Amino acid sequence: MSKTARGRKPDIMFLNIVFCLIVIFIHISSEVVTDMPKDTAFFTGVFSAQKLSSFVVQGFLLLSGVKLFLHKGDGIDFAKYYTSRFFRIILPYVFWATLYYLYFCRTGAYKFGASDLVWRLICGDIWAHFYFIIVLVQFELLAPLWMLLFKRGSAAVHIAFSAVITAICAQYLPSVLTTLFPSMPDFSVSNCFLRYQIYWTAGCLIGKNYEEFRKYLKSSKVIITITFIICAALYVFLALATLGHEPVWLELFNILYSMSAILFFYMISQLFTLGGGSALKPLAPFDRSTYTIYLVHCLMIVLLNNYLTAKGISDIPQRFAIRAAVIYAACFMLGYIWQFIKYLIKKAFAGPKDREIV
């Protein structure tokens, strides 16, 4: 299978970009879902689209598992791997999350304290989207376990066992942990990696058997598409029917929907492997900047919301339209500017070109 610049497979590049765009949509639409009257068509449309987007963080976790096994197979230099994860994942997170924290201290949302900052960094509590980083780090810290575990046993057994773990933890883990540890914050409970085990397991197994998986996508287009359409329609219907009192079982159904959606988009991504992924090459800087964009975009939204409020713009649909135009444009600009800055830094130091470990 052909690769784009820096060895990125075009289908993974496509998914990385699409998932990032969907994450941005979830956050720019949050005001509509929380503040818009529930009996309006605009709310229903945006709420439905947001529910249909709810698979995307799980998709990022699955992609991380894919890349771990796709690039390393059965062998990995763990010293290099953990060094890479520190500089590529943890250090940028600490930097940007600290900036968020300092900004919210300035606005009075938080009262500054070194211990408070450290605790919030560990728990991913400074802003809502940081929970993903905490979950990802837990999975990546356990890389030796996954390498050992997925060498043995059938894929079906691993998937089935992980699905059971995910379902049980999604339904019972929060109540169990809060009972055992009453002082444990809700966000700490939500950040337990076991609640996302099925996605990581599926990603690792896909990465280990990548060409076989691509053949499966090619031969199962109809069933994947039909399954996705049925699950999507049911999920939106159930979410609207239980609006305001979302039951636990809906989260269990979300697992099924998320897997169907990830498979569907993975199937779509195969179209971009044609011609070596040449159609995606202009978007390569954005692709390589998606992690930075993920970290930064919510602060952009907060600043823009404050500006719109200061200007007296209170109409929710209008604010949503402005957010969409400004934030998407800003994120694309950030992607290209960030890659140019990195290019200048590398050129200035004139060292050997860094290689992406995962």
Image: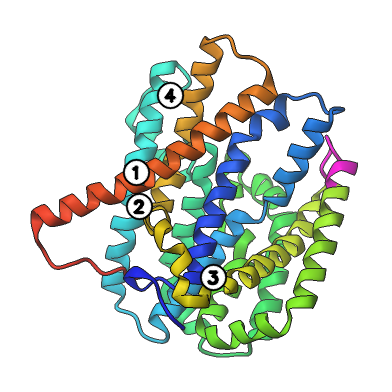
In primary-sequence order, the first of circles 3 and 1 is: 1
Left or right: 80 in relation to 330:
left
C-alpha separation, residue under disc 3 versus residue under disc 2: 31 Å
How many numbered marks are there? 4
* Residue corresponding to mark 1: 94
In primary-sequence order, the first of circles 2 and 4 is: 2
Which circle marks residue 104 in the picture?
Answer: 4
- Label 1 CA crowd tier, 10 Å (few <14, some 14–19, many 20+): some
> Residue at the spot x=38%, y=34% of the render?
117
Indicate the position of residue 333 as horizontal and vertical percent values: 38, 41
In primary-sequence order, the first of circles 4 and 1 is: 1
C-alpha separation, residue under disc 2 versus residue under disc 4: 21 Å
* Residue corresponding to mark 2: 90
Is residue 121 visible in the rendered image? The answer is: yes
Q: Amino acid at mark 1?
A: Val
* Residue corresponding to mark 3: 272
* Magenta part, dominant SS: loop
